[in-house]
Amino acid sequence: MPSFEKWTLTRRFWQDRHWGADVHDLGWVPNRNLLVVTTSFIYGEGAVYLLDLERQEFVTLLIPEDCGSHILAINESSVTIGLNDCESPSPYRRVVLTFPQCNSQSQPAPSGAAER
């Protein structure tokens, strides 16, 4: 039985189908090994994700069902997202999303989904 290797040349967690096809914004969380990614619903999932690249886990922070969320501000404990109503280039609403304090809510990458 082959052993599972977390890091290989073909296992690219950061290119997972949930967020890899239609990234709007991405931002590193200061002083943490985390990445926030916003996607569009056109080719992506239309959500805001918190990625732990080292552990290859993610948390879906929000599925806003808008025309594309954008990162407005980010700090060690939260991200401020601007929601777009499809009619104006300016965000119609700001939402502050707090990061989970522990990884108990993290979801591992779907089996085989991150492999290309």
Image (tube, rainbow, N blue to C red):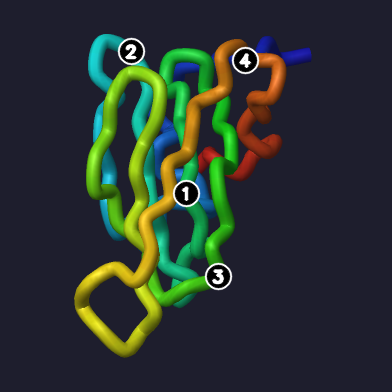
- Mark 1 and mark 4: span between their CA atoms? 17 Å
- Mark 2 and mark 1: span between their CA atoms? 18 Å
- Mark 2 and mark 4: span between their CA atoms? 13 Å
| Residue placed under numbered mark 4 in the picture | 103
Q: The disc labelled 2 sits on which kind of residue? A: Arg
Question: Residue 109, located in which quarter of the rendered image?
Answer: top right
Q: In this view, which residue lies farthest toward the bottom?
A: 87
Q: Position of residue 54 (x, y in %)?
A: 43, 14
Q: Position of residue 66 (x, y in %)?
A: 47, 73
The answer to whether 76 is drawn above or below residue 116 in the figure is: above
Are the residues flagged by discs 1 and 4 in contact, CB closer than 8 Å?
no
The residue tagged with tag 2: helix, strand or loop?
loop
Lower position in the chain sequence, tag 1 or tag 4: 1
Q: Report how many numbered discs are placed on residues in the image.
A: 4
Image mark for residue 65: 3
- Mark 4 and mark 3: span between their CA atoms? 25 Å
Q: Position of residue 9 (x, y in %)?
A: 38, 27
Lower position in the chain sequence, tag 4 or tag 3: 3
| Residue placed under numbered mark 2 in the picture | 32
Q: Residue at x 64, y 39 (%)?
A: 112
How would you rate the neighbour count of disc 3 (Cα within 10 Å): few for under 14, some for 14-19, many for 20 or more? some
| Residue placed under numbered mark 1 in the picture | 48
Residue nearest the observer in this picture, 12 or 62: 62
Image mark for residue 6: none
**Is residue 2 in view from this perspective?**
yes
Lower position in the chain sequence, tag 2 or tag 4: 2
